[in-house]
Amino acid sequence: MGGSFSKTLLIVDDDRFFCDLVRAYFAGRDLRVLSAHTKEEGGRLARDERIDVVLLDQHLPDGDGVDLCLPLLAVNDHAKIIFITAYPSFDNVLQALRRGANDYLAKPIEIEELGLIVEKVLRTQELERVERIQTFKNLQESRENVLIGAEGGLREVAQLVRLSAAHDASVLITGETGTGKNVVARAIHSLREKNNIPFVGINCAALPENLIESELFGHEKGAFTGAVAAKKGIFEMADGGTLFLDEIGDLPLHLQAKLLGILDDKQLLRVGGQTTRKVDVRIIAATNLDIRQAIREKRFREDLYYRLALMKIHIPPLRERKEDIAALCRMFLRTISQDVALCIDDEEIGRLAGYDWPGNVRELKNVTERAVILRRGPAIQPSQFLELPETPRLGGPSVGGTVVKSLAEAEKEHILGILQHCQGNHSKTALLLGISRSTLLRKLSQFAEAAM
């Protein structure tokens, strides 16, 4: 049989007419059908081929089909076995299920019923595959969510993370863009005793304002044009787990009020809905705003701030914890190039420590990745990719004859330089800087106001 198939079905049955009937039924589908008429032949095919589903007859010319269950699963542990018997006694079926069969059919068999059972076990198999991938991804993330700097510049943060993980109180994480607020949020979640509960994260600044309410709280069918079916929101998806609201400072004021109500009452109302729904969600929020200034300017609700900041964690910028640069670089190298032995020497670490890092940890990761991609040997030099100013500004304080810029000046120059490089494209600039487009536009507006 030619062609390429994603799944393989093996029939182990001495009834050749039945084998031909099954092959004809599945013809034209993305399913390769193999057949064996003895236990020995079935075992050989299972060893030589990757088998996904097995139709296994109870009685075979050279023995009982049930004896093939364990050898089949030993070489194809993901396979699903459908046991076929002309004598569907409780003992026969129980014996097959105990040896790894997933379902059973009694002869004579309705081919449509067989088709439905095969489709069901294939769906189950796919869901198990997705779950294995997600479990592996969660394990990898939990390894990566170790706070680099817990013994250095993040000692206080690490202590607060452990305290926050011990209870379900809301947490507000503050810090400049790129400091790793999402890593701290995941660290809090992964340290909880119930580590199988969901973690759902969303960037409030990345959502279109006309859709943000629906995305967060869900909507009912017909709530607005295009709402052809009811839809769960992020809150309902995170029910029983942790919801990470990044860039919470960009949430519109009317939705801040709705969020406050959910935090207080643990109930939400979908857009266009008439009845409330209970939700049990632990909120971790993050912002790079000066939240006190935002409150004074009436851009953030003070009552919501106090409700979120039951635990408050501030992440210092990288320029204030340069002792962590070496450990961060080693971690990036492990995750970026797991199959290649790379290194950064002490002299290069010294050059990196002499930089102010306006983009914080995200910028360090960016230049490290670039250095890995463009390397010429095992020793990499991220410093050659730093966005250093070509000429110092005149005036201002100096140290050892070198003009020192303020942090605000360095940030402005860095952002405008990237904007010029991207020929004024705001979306591309925000992507390269590792910030949201709304954050970029807000900063550009601040630069323009300061110049007036």
Image (cartoon, grey):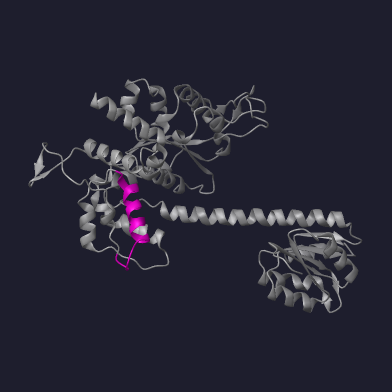
Provide the residue span drawn in magenta: 359-379
Relative depth, front residue between 405 and 63:
405
The residue shown at (78%, 78%) is: 41
Residue 193 lies in the magenta stretch: no
Q: Is residue 319 left or right of residue 87?
A: left
Q: Is residue 347 left or right of residue 360?
A: left
Would you identify the image quadrant in which residue 217 lies? top right
Residue 370 lies in the magenta stretch: yes
Relative depth, front residue between 57 and 395:
395
The residue shown at (87%, 62%) is: 89
Q: Position of residue 143 (x, y in %)?
A: 43, 56
Q: Is residue 385 left or right of residue 83?
A: left
Report the quarter where the C terminus lies. top left
Report the quarter where the N terminus lies. bottom right
Q: Is residue 374 visible?
A: yes
Q: Position of residue 219 (x, y in %)?
A: 61, 29
The residue shown at (31%, 26%) is: 292
